[in-house]
Amino acid sequence: MTAAHPTMQAICLRRLPQGMPQVDDFELCRRVIPVASEGQVLVRTRWLSLDPFLRAQLGGRYAAACPTPGDVIPGYGIGEVVADRSGRFRPGTLVVTTTGWAEYAAVGADQASVVNAGPVSPTLALGVLGMPGLAAWIGVRKILEPKSGQTIVISSAAGVVGSVAGQLCKAAGCHVVGISSQARKCEIVTRDYGFDACISHRSEHFARDLHEACPDGIDGYFDNVGGMVLEATLGVLRQRARVVLCGLIDQYNRAERPPGPNLGPVIAARARLEGLVVHDHLADLAQSRRELQSMVQAGTLRYHEQVAQGLCGAPAAFIDLLRGEHVGKVLASMGVQA
Amino acid sequence: MTAAHPTMQAICLRRLPQGMPQVDDFELCRRVIPVASEGQVLVRTRWLSLDPFLRAQLGGRYAAACPTPGDVIPGYGIGEVVADRSGRFRPGTLVVTTTGWAEYAAVGADQASVVNAGPVSPTLALGVLGMPGLAAWIGVRKILEPKSGQTIVISSAAGVVGSVAGQLCKAAGCHVVGISSQARKCEIVTRDYGFDACISHRSEHFARDLHEACPDGIDGYFDNVGGMVLEATLGVLRQRARVVLCGLIDQYNRAERPPGPNLGPVIAARARLEGLVVHDHLADLAQSRRELQSMVQAGTLRYHEQVAQGLCGAPAAFIDLLRGEHVGKVLASMGVQA
């Protein structure tokens, strides 16, 4: 098959990583160069994009399928079109697509987007001008919606998503605090990306440092990490703060996920969790009462009440309530004559 | 002081409860009947409202101050105005106010709201027509926003908040599933409140029962419990699901709070957490790229790239990335001549 089926180099999965991946979980392999079928393009890979989410995919914890041993490692990259059977690309055009870790890939033309780099490096289409940049932009524009003067915290601040998100918040006039794993990265975050401060989550004083960097609490948090960094940051939220749940780097290399409510499904579902404290809504009490009272009178809103007799019955009734032994509203009647 | 200072009965705190409160954490005590000062009303307590949040307050985990031994137990109630120094209430008027667990209370007139019960029981002003009803109404109307045909799950479904929330969602045409602690309460939830189903979170098959009751996942969840009930429910969220974080009954009696991200501060901050998956937003890629590219060209958006050489360098570069040894975007250059 050599002449008719020329081969290429690729990196294949040798075995699924346990915990932190090792170099020998991967191996160099040879594969037949694929042929573009109708509607596809053949690209020669120029740059591979190495992304943390691949670790999740290599554990079956990602939307895309988990590869099995022998498979070419999946992933995005920039390729140069060498053959087009879609009528949409000229040879030589650079496109972002799912190249995988291989010298060539045949992909559907609608899975390839042209790199219009202009005067900037084409590689930015995998970084600040690509999906990571879009994630930052959406999180800031559509969820955080930062206002001038607000305090915004961003984890993985030295990463592409975090650094773009922080610079967008700086441009919006915010006080921006980065969280990173290392002092040398924090230096880049403040010096190159212009964050107002940056703290290391590996410091033993992390919680204190976070409080000191955000003495009035935070209005928004862009989370790429999860775990104890998220935990600490939730503790300094200001009223009506917004939190973007964008990544869980903390969990990607763990065999067991950490205890407590797992927010991974919240990300996967694009769900929204919102805290409700009823005292904020007293202005709506009259309207809610009108509507609910008309339902009670119409028999469409039903209720149960359980009434303990006398002041001295209140403690036992309260304890029953906490034990879940009650039904509906629990009251203590003071037994005063009407 | 007997004649000049008549006394009343009250229930006072004997000691702060450890874990589940005991009856002897409370004690009957006598206190001088307070006198209404200018702007206040004196009320004779008719009904006490017994509420789970009091347990949080008795541990210093609530917005209101934690009482100390000897203090009258705080709380809402309905009282009858017996003396008015505000010019706003006629004697005999029933008001909801912070009576505490005592026969009489003097409170600011603006802290008392008239009970306009009409044909229904005045006690409903502490239940379905009071703050619990308002909490349910706000959570459903402003956060869940249920649409006909959607599946909504509600925990503490037999409680006032849960039962009202569920009946509002039924009225909106939803498939409503309750979660409760006991089979006898579940019977009330389905029979009296009209929920479509109700499952016990104390069942060993809870997770399976939840999946079976919501085979297509859930569009909204009204959480009054936290802990493993919240955890299980987050696992069955449908796309764009909304979650109301309204209570943490699971934590109120624990000395130590459970591990993992604590959502208590999220409730206290009325914060919003939202999952972001960038692939949903490809339609915005062009706009984000235009804006970010103009910032790059203007020098107001900076970036770092780290480029590994060659396909064989990719595994080690990927591992460095997971170890956090990189800065900015990590690429592997395939070394093809341009």
Image (tube, coloured by chain):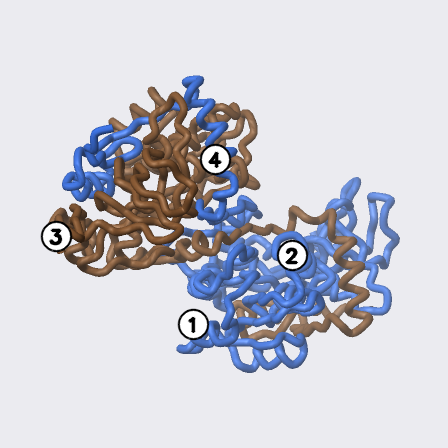
Chain colours: A brown, B blue
Number of the front mark, 4 or 1: 4
Which comes sooner in the sequence, label 4 or label 3?
Answer: 3
Q: Secondary structure at mark 1?
A: helix
Query: Pointers 4 and 1 in contact (CB under 8 A)?
Result: no
Q: Are marks 4 and 3 on the same chain?
A: yes
Query: Pointers 2 and 4 in contact (CB under 8 A)?
Result: no
Question: Which disc is residue B207 wearing?
Answer: 1
Which comes sooner in the sequence, label 2 or label 1?
Answer: 2
The residue under the point 43% across, 52% down is B262
Q: Between A58 and A71, which is closer to the camera in this rendering?
A: A71
Which three-letter amino acid code belongs to the residue tagged 3?
Thr
Q: Which residue is mark 3?
A: A2
Q: Secondary structure at mark 4?
A: helix
Q: Which residue is mark 4?
A: A137
Residue B246 in picture, x, y percent from top left: 56, 56
For residue A332, say whether it is visible. no
